Image (tube, helix red, strand yellow):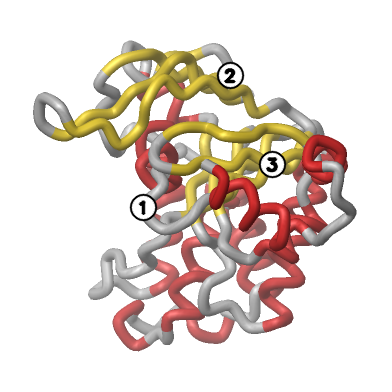
Amino acid sequence: MIEIKNVTKCYGKKTKVIENLDLTIKDGEIFGFLGPNGAGKTTTINMITGILEITDGEILVDGKSIITNPIEAKKAIGFVSDDPNIFLKLKGIEYLTFIADLFEMSTEERIKKIENLSKRFELYNYLDNRIESYSHGMRQKLMIIASLIHSPQNWILDEPMVGLDPKASYELKKEMRKLANENRCVFFSTHVLDVAEKLCDRIGIINKGKLVFVGTYEDIKNELKENKSLEELFMEIIKDD
């Protein structure tokens, strides 16, 4: 479970990019985080994962503070960044081994997980190649595999479907549902609203650094009293905001 408690993020003394954000993402659900470019989605995710400092407020991951107990909080997270251009000089297998080392995985466990996940995402035959030789989609697959290698309780993904081929997108969505069914927490941002409509148990919409809606797709339709697609309802919400 991820608890975001009255979180604010400022750059400089006055520029607020996130303002008084309160949000709980529960175990056993897929939560979609939606918003236009610049709304604060990636900033929020980077605060949850400890990449950015929080100006004010608190974030708890399975009850552990990302501020005062960051190592234990991060151990419970698997993270897919929106930028897959990392450690480009390493081979794919070297990067995955590095991640397995960070999470102190046994040799037997890491071999099994790397083989299983890399075959599912069709990267197994490329693990001995350097990451710099990978396409964008292949790098994205590598990050997805790395984020799952330690079986995280909380899976956080920032625009994870960008660059993925249809089979990889299918496997990703299947894995999201699998983890939610195992009572884990899945939190992802996306601009692909038809995917969010079909996949998410709940969604949150952020605009200009403020949360403007939290609930199910049915909740949005009931609130706006319109039986439209999520994409159409989303456009109405951010227009009115």
Query: Who comes first in sequence, dot 3 or dot 1?
Result: 1
Q: Quadrant of residue 49?
A: top left
Q: Which sits in the foreground, 178 or 105? A: 178
Q: Residue furthest left?
A: 12
Inspect the image, locate mark 1, and give the three-letter code of the amino acid beneath it: Gly
Q: Quadrant of residue 13?
A: top left
Q: What label sits on residue 203 in the rendered view?
A: 3
Quarter of the image containing the N terminus?
top right
Where residue 70 appears, x then y in whole percent?
36, 22
The residues bearing labels 3 and 1 have C-alpha atoms spaced at a distance of 18 Å
Q: What label sits on residue 51 in the rendered view?
A: none
Inspect the image, locate mark 2, and give the three-letter code of the amino acid beneath it: Asp
The residues bearing labels 3 and 2 have C-alpha atoms spaced at a distance of 20 Å
The residues bearing labels 2 and 1 have C-alpha atoms spaced at a distance of 28 Å
Crowd tier of the residue under label 1, counting other residues whose Cα lies within 10 Å: few below 14, some 14–19, many 20 or above? few
The residue identified by callout 2 is: 62
